[in-house]
Image (cartoon, rainbow, N blue to C red):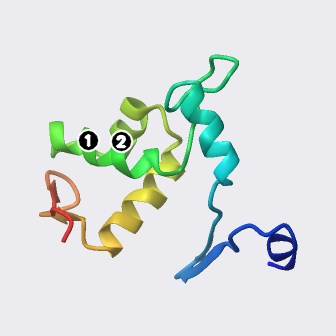
């Protein structure tokens, strides 16, 4: 926290949830400006820029196409690690944007629009 303050950057957002501690750091303004010059979501070297923000969006997109997918299938479809998909989907359930309906086997996902 002190290092962020002394560098005059935004201090991270700290959130405690059962079994997890989340720290969210904001990108520096000059980094975001540099991205705009190279096309959104791309690095100068041409590799895709990966951010944690993509995972929940990719999960919702995948489940929107097929509500009966299991998280392992979402992981394969999005190219994200299963644990990352599990964490992101748990957070989506916690904030009420995602809900599982029915039995563990044979149920389906339901996406709730943002309020």
Q: CA distance from mark 1 to mark 2?
A: 5 Å
Evaluate whether residue 68 shows in this view. Answer: yes
Q: Nearer the viewer, residue 58 or 81?
A: 58
Percent of width and height locating residue 86: 44, 56
Q: State the quadrant of the N terminus.
A: bottom right
Q: Secondary structure at mark 2?
A: helix
- Is residue 98 shown left or right of residue 15? left
Q: Nearer the viewer, residue 19 or 50?
A: 50
Percent of width and height locating residue 114: 21, 65
Which mark identifies residue 58? Answer: 2
Do the residues under discs 1 and 2 have CB atoms within 8 angstroms? yes
Residue, x 53% and y 50% (percent of image)?
A: 52
Percent of width and height locating residue 59: 33, 46
- Specify the quadrant of the image occupied by residue 33: top right
Q: Secondary structure at mark 1?
A: helix
- Specify the quadrant of the image occupied by residue 35: top right
Q: Nearer the viewer, residue 19 or 2?
A: 2
Label 1: few (<14), some (14–19) or many (≥20) C-alpha neighbours in 10 Å: some
Percent of width and height locating residue 19: 57, 78
Q: Nearer the viewer, residue 64 or 7?
A: 7
Residue, x 22% and y 44% (percent of image)?
A: 63
- Is residue 5 shown left or right of residue 93? right
Residue, x 35% and y 47% (percent of image)?
A: 57
- The residue tagged 1 is 61
Q: How many numbered markers are drawn?
A: 2
């Amino acid at each position: 926290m002190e290092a962020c303050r002394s560098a005059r950057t935004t201090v991270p957002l700290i959130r405690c949830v059962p079994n997890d501690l989340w720290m969210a750091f904001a990108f520096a303004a000059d980094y975001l400006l540099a991205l705009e010059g190279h096309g959104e979501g791309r690095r100068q070297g041409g590799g895709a820029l990966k951010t944690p923000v993509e995972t929940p969006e990719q999960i919702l997109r995948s489940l929107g196409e097929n509500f009966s997918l299991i998280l392992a299938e979402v992981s394969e479809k999005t190219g994200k690690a299963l644990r990352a998909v599990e964490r992101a989907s748990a957070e989506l359930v916690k904030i009420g944007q995602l809900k599982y309906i029915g039995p563990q086997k044979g149920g389906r996902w339901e996406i709730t629009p943002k309020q």
